[in-house]
Image (cartoon, helix red, strand yellow):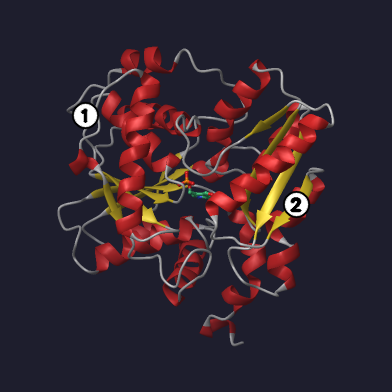
Amino acid sequence: MNQTPDFDRLDRALAKWPRVTLTHTPTPLEHLPRLSAHYPAHSLMLKRDDCTGLAMGGNKARQLEFYLGEAQVQGCDTVLSTGAVQSNYMRMLAAAAAKLGFECHIQLETRVKSNDTDYLESGNVLLDKLFGAHIHSFAEGEDEHGADKKLKQIADQLAADGKQPYIVPLAPVEQPKGALGYALAARELAEQFMQQGIEPDMIVVGSGSGLTHAGLLTGFRTLGMSIPVIGMCVRRPVEAQYPRILSTCRKVERMLGLEEVVKEFDIEVSDLALAPGYGQVSQKVVQTIQDVAALEGILLDPVYSAKTVAGTLMMLESGMLEDKNNIVMIHTGGTPALFAYRKQILSLPEFGL
Ligand SMILES: Cc1ncc(COP(=O)(O)O)c(C=O)c1O
């Protein structure tokens, strides 16, 4: 590899942040030979963060290591957070809380209007219940601040009842500690590139709250690596996601004691695969889930990882990536949500329904 990563610089910057181990890392970095064969000039690889090992895996396990590390240091006994009904974050928080002995409260927001019992009761919701989480509901899923306000009220009530609550934030905060988990993942990837002799031309990652995207990008730049990191929008269009990522990178830099290692031109976002909107799937996304399952034996999820892969394939198919031979996509997990989207998946013509 042309750029030797400065591991010491990143290690020093991360050293002061408390962390608890929840993940099985390193997760594999795998070549996708049968999918790549459909794009002869390119080699497609997948970083298998669906294999992080906590409760069916996913990116949030890396983020929670830093939040729950802090909750332990602060002597908290209860954790709470807010997310969509089929949130993977809430499922993994519930599992991590069970593992570490925290009481757990999760607020499920109605971001996707649905009366489908698969959506409302299966997938992540079923698992939330298995992990013993206390479930609260919030009807206005697009009101990020309203959801936070209601969560704060629940936390205040828990405190009044004698608990020591710790809120895991989802909306932007001054210290987005979860992003540190992905600065660390950048380190893990850099090691794998060296070990496997890979020179990646770009990385593609789902971009929702943006902590995974901003953490990876800041991590690579701290290591002194200039590899492009493209955020595939899963919740907001480019106009809203770009400033969100820029501001998150600046916050992560401050947490790492660094200044503007990420340049404005480093922030690349695409909303090619976003339509018809958050948590809703297009025919291309469902087709991508089926293709990757049938060609590689790998399960993508409908809300995040399938949009990441579908968006990459759409870029390839439209000739936008002609100079990008080695493409690494991040599988951020979310597989349990497949069961919540049973009807949409079965709507493919080949299933004959
Ligand atoms: C499976 C999965 N992938 C990707 C994301 C997006 O990650 P981030 O919120 O860090 O942008 C999420 C967020 O909930 C997720 O659950």
Between marks 2 and 1 in the image, the one whose residue lies nearer the viewer: 2
- Give coordinates of residue 201: x percent, y percent: 22, 44
Instruction: Specify whether residue 55 is in view.
Output: no
- Of all residues, the one furthest to the right in this rendering is 161
Which residue shows up at 15% across the image and 53% down it? 323
- Quadrant containing the C terminus is bottom right
- Give coordinates of residue 219: x percent, y percent: 34, 29
Give the secondary structure at mark 2.
strand
Counting the numbered discs, the total is 2
Q: Residues within 10 Å of mark 2 (few under 14, many from 20)?
A: some
Picture quadrant of residue 156: top right
Q: Residues within 10 Å of mark 1 (few under 14, many from 20)?
A: few
Q: Which residue is mark 2?
A: 136
Amino acid of disc 2: His
Q: Which residue is mark 1?
A: 1
Which residue shows up at 52% across the image and 85% down it? 349
Q: Earlier in the sequence, mark 2 or mark 1?
A: 1
Do residues under tags 2 and 1 come within 8 Å of each other at their CB atoms? no
- Give coordinates of residue 37: x percent, y percent: 32, 61
* CA separation in Å, label 2 and label 1: 49 Å
Amino acid of disc 1: Met
